[in-house]
Structure formats: structure tokens, C-alpha cells
């Protein structure tokens, strides 16, 4: 295998550069910075993604797939108990939000920065949140929660808040408060 065969092509380099830069700097990062980081010509951006909007949407799609898999892996590692599986997610997010390199939730940041409601990135983030909602709701159903869909809504709000607090208030400790709130969401709807 030659060295050039191991090097990713322009499409993959653009995706990798955009995934890193849009997380560190936001979706407003300039096209020139993306092209420079990827080491590709402007033509590659348009050939592979139709422009920056297409690249942003594809980066969000790739990231959501990776993150959804991480949610599933975290839950699987916690065993079969739905309560433990849901709390494992909150605990993991608490650790992530406490990391010094944490810049916040990529999806919340994108939704806030992409002011055009028709931007293709919004559909990606909506699809991702629907997938997480189903994932959480399924656990609440398995737990016997009285209002599984509503509890999944509450947990998603808690996740957004935990990640936002981790990014905007690094001197705070949102993880313990989030865990206690998650326990309340879970336990308050259990049928006796």
C-alpha cells in the first residue's frame, strides 16, 4: 500500500476538517478556513457537497450517527435495567460536559447559529432529537413509567441544559444536579 492510498480523499478530508472546526468554532467558520484545514481546492467543496450548507448538513449527519451510537453503547454497557441505562447516559454526559475541552452541544449550537429555517442542517438535528426521544421513550416504557413520551421530552430538555451549562458555566457542576433531576423524572412516573 502506498502512502497516497492511505491518505483520505478530498471529500473525507473536508468532512474531518469541518467536523473538527465547526465544533471548535461553530458553523459560522469560514469556507477558506475549512478548505485550508482540509487541504483541498474550493472546487472539491462544490463537487462533493454543493457548497458549505451541504457540507454542514453532512457533518451534522455524520456526527449524529456517531453520537447516537455512543448513546446506545453507553446504555448497553449499563446492563438491562432501564433506570440504570437512562442514568448512565446522564452520568456520561456529565463527564463530557466537565471536560476542559468541551465546547457545548454541536446540535444546539448549530440550530441557534443557522438562522435560515430552511437550512438542511435543521432537519438533521430534528431527526437526531426524534431518534433520541424514541430511544429514551423506549426505556421509559420498559421501566413502566406512567408518561414515557413526556418523560423522554423532559430528559431531552435536561440533556440540553446539562450540555449548555457545561459549556457556558465551566465553574459550575451541572452533573450532580442533572443526575438528581434525571432520578426525579424517572422515579416520579413509576407506577406503584
Image: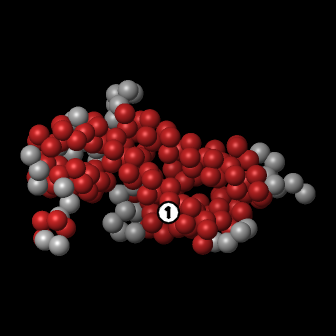
Residue 55: x %, y % from top left = 27, 42
Residue 27: x %, y % from top left = 28, 44
Characterize the local packing of mark 1: few (<14), some (14-19) or many (20 or more) Cα atoms within 10 angstroms.
some
**In the picture shown, does residue 133 fall above or below 78?**
above
**In the picture shown, does residue 20 fall above or below 157?**
below
- Name the colour scheme: secondary structure
**Residue found 50% across the figure and 63% down from its top:** 70
Locate the C terminus and report the quarter of the image it occupies.
bottom right
In this view, which residue lies farthest toward the right? 192
**Residue found 57% across the figure and 49% down from its top:** 132
Locate the N terminus and report the quarter of the image it occupies.
bottom left
Front position in the image: 101 or 11? 11
Residue 99: x %, y % from top left = 40, 69
**Residue found 44% across the figure and 35% down from its top:** 123
On the question of residue 98 being in view, the answer is yes
- Horizontally, residue 55 falls left or right of residue 156, namely left
Quarter assignment of residue 121:
top left
In this view, which residue lies farthest toward the front? 1
- Horizontally, residue 40 falls left or right of residue 118, namely left
Residue 23: x %, y % from top left = 31, 54
- Horizontally, residue 80 falls left or right of residue 2, namely right
Tell me the SS state at disc 1. helix
Task: Tally the marks.
Answer: 1
Front position in the image: 75 or 21? 75
**Residue found 12% across the figure and 65% down from its top:** 4
Residue located beneath label 1 in the image: 70
**In the picture shown, does residue 77 fall above or below 145?**
below
On the question of residue 174 being in view, the answer is no
- Horizontally, residue 161 falls left or right of residue 120, namely right
Amino acid at each position: 500500500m502506498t502512502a497516497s492510498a492511505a491518505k483520505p480523499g478530498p471529500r473525507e478530508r473536508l468532512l474531518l476538517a469541518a467536523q473538527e472546526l465547526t465544533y471548535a468554532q461553530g458553523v459560522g467558520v469560514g469556507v477558506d478556513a475549512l478548505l485550508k484545514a482540509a487541504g483541498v481546492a474550493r472546487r472539491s467543496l462544490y463537487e462533493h457537497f454543493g457548497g458549505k450548507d451541504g457540507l454542514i448538513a453532512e457533518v451534522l449527519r455524520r456526527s449524529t450517527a456517531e453520537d447516537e451510537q455512543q448513546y446506545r453503547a453507553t446504555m448497553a454497557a449499563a446492563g438491562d435495567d432501564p433506570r440504570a441505562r437512562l442514568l448512565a447516559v446522564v452520568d456520561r454526559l456529565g463527564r463530557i460536559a466537565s471536560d476542559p475541552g468541551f465546547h457545548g452541544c454541536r446540535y444546539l449550537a448549530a440550530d441557534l447559529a443557522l438562522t435560515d429555517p430552511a437550512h438542511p442542517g435543521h432537519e438533521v438535528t430534528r431527526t437526531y432529537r426524534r431518534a433520541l426521544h424514541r430511544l429514551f421513550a423506549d426505556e421509559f416504557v420498559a421501566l413502566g413509567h406512567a408518561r414515557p413520551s413526556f418523560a423522554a421530552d423532559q430528559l431531552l430538555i435536561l440533556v440540553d441544559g446539562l450540555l449548555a451549562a457545561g459549556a457556558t458555566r465551566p465553574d459550575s457542576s451541572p452533573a450532580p444536579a442533572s443526575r438528581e433531576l434525571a432520578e426525579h423524572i424517572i422515579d416520579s412516573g413509576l407506577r406503584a
